[in-house]
Image (spheres, coloured by chain):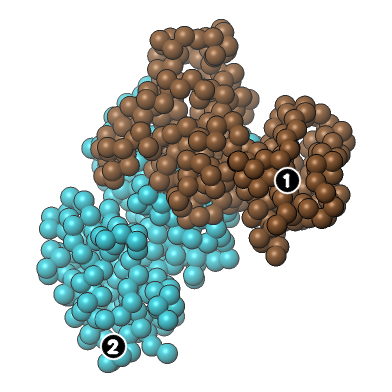
Chain colours: A cyan, B brown
Amino acid sequence: MGVYGGIEAGGTKMVCAVGTAPDDIRAEGRFPTASPEESIPRAIRFFKDHTSAGELDAIGIAAFGPVDPDPRSPTWGYVTTTPKPGWAHTDFAGQIKRALDVPVGFDTDVNVAALGEHRWGAARGLHTFIYLTVGTGIGGGGMVEGRLLHGMMHPEMGHIRVPHDRNEDPFEGQCIYHGDCLEGLACGPALEERWGQPAETLPPEHAAWELEARYLALGVVNYTLTLAPQRVIMGGGVMNQTHLFPMIRKNVQSLLNDYLQVSQVTSDLKHFVVPPELGARAGVLGAIALAEQAALTHL
Amino acid sequence: MGVYGGIEAGGTKMVCAVGTAPDDIRAEGRFPTASPEESIPRAIRFFKDHTSAGELDAIGIAAFGPVDPDPRSPTWGYVTTTPKPGWAHTDFAGQIKRALDVPVGFDTDVNVAALGEHRWGAARGLHTFIYLTVGTGIGGGGMVEGRLLHGMMHPEMGHIRVPHDRNEDPFEGQCIYHGDCLEGLACGPALEERWGQPAETLPPEHAAWELEARYLALGVVNYTLTLAPQRVIMGGGVMNQTHLFPMIRKNVQSLLNDYLQVSQVTSDLKHFVVPPELGARAGVLGAIALAEQAALTHL
């Protein structure tokens, strides 16, 4: 049996790993996400340096978006319309595949993190769940009936519209497309802009967190009513404020108001809204899981 | 080859049909949805009267909810917590199955209508789409990657929260659980309560419709960002006001504000937000399609 390679390509850094499972990571490297001309060859070099000839069975790529993850599309594996300099319309997966000559799996960062949680973390044994990340932006992915969410392109959950009481919260929202969509009201930079200081410097008793928990709960409730997930996993930098979890659960419960008569949300919210078990490693481990899938698909 | 039976059980009437396709319906009957003790035997009698011995291959049931459509559950095929007198915790599918001794498919009315549209209507060839009904309530179903949406129980899309400007629309909403959720603001009875007359008597130029189109577009946008459907099919009594379609599309476009760079929503909204091709027959024809699936599954 060989090994898998995983690439987690975020907006600021890339993490590469070689291994087969969370307890069998044989090499790991991280470097800044520079131009594609610099970063993609660097990733290729990493895998050549850290595997012997024929040892690498497949690669999984978790990419910042928007991307084209549709295997039926001619631009499968591309980063598409990103504002990130140099990366728009880049054939990311194709370059990796041609250089390393192995099957390549390619998906959004959130879907790959979701896959990682499904393989080894908080979504083991579930068929329908959501993975949200709340950080620089708000993104969502997940599975429905065992399949990663794709659809027309891929979800952009962070941009849903939610109630915004301007008397209570006069902040206009900071999404350049939608103003006060969920991301515009509740991502990390929105917190910083509204309160005039970085989110992580706001003490747990600050009113910012009650408001944040309410917005995030509105998101959880809307996604839950739309997809009926068995669990909602919430990761990302903002969710490192772990005191948010009980506050979000309380708001989810009061917003649903006993409408959904299923034990997951009536009595067991502690297991319904949860942090990722793989923590910050969900992305790169998910990429390993995606490689494993790619290898199986191409047998 | 035999025939399939379909049951569309709505809150007020039941429609039963025998056939194999929209152009091959060999018998159809409709009667009020009374108590289960009266209505279920009546449906059974219909199929016995309209098929010869051994001819019936399977039955599909589209049921008003909430229901349990999970084949892994001990209460599969039950209508569960409905307020409809006599129907709470009724083993609907089981009674049909025992009496007719054929495979039985069972799902929510909206999922079954979605299946009908997938088999013979506006969702042919799609893998991910949403079917919404806007009438006495607002409900949603659909498919993700070729599978009907189920999840933890089934979606309750009508109850998502959307922005509600009380200066512009002081109506409080009429959902007994959530007040001004989407259903509470935009279902047929909400229109009637807000404007003091039945929705269908409001002329097309009435301000009611612009507001209605805006709320429904907020729903379409939130579902689209969450599930990335290839198409959103909108049926139900309120959508018989066909002038709503262009108004909803215009609002969807301005709410998305060029964020999603896919042709479906940038240039081709006319084919993205559409009425059901099977019209009011989506439910009973979907039940025939569900029976067809049940027969195939049990081969």
Report crowding for label 2: few under 14, some 14 to 19, many 20 or more residues within 10 A (C-alpha). some
Question: Which label was assigned to residue B39?
Answer: none
Name the amino acid type tagged 1. Answer: Gly
> Mark 2 — residue?
A51
Which residue occupies 54% across, 54% down?
Answer: B147
Q: Is residue A189 visible?
A: no
Is residue B61 toward the left or the right of residue B173 in the image? right
The residue depicted at 13 percent of the width and 63 percent of the height is A35
* Chain at tag 2: A
**Chain of the residue displaying label 1:** B
From the image, state whether disc 1 or disc 2 is nearer to you.
1
Where is the C terminus of chain A found, in terms of image quarters?
bottom left
- Name the secondary structure under disc 1: strand
**Residue of label 1:** B5
Q: Is residue A251 left or right of residue A101?
A: right
Q: Is residue A286 visible?
A: yes
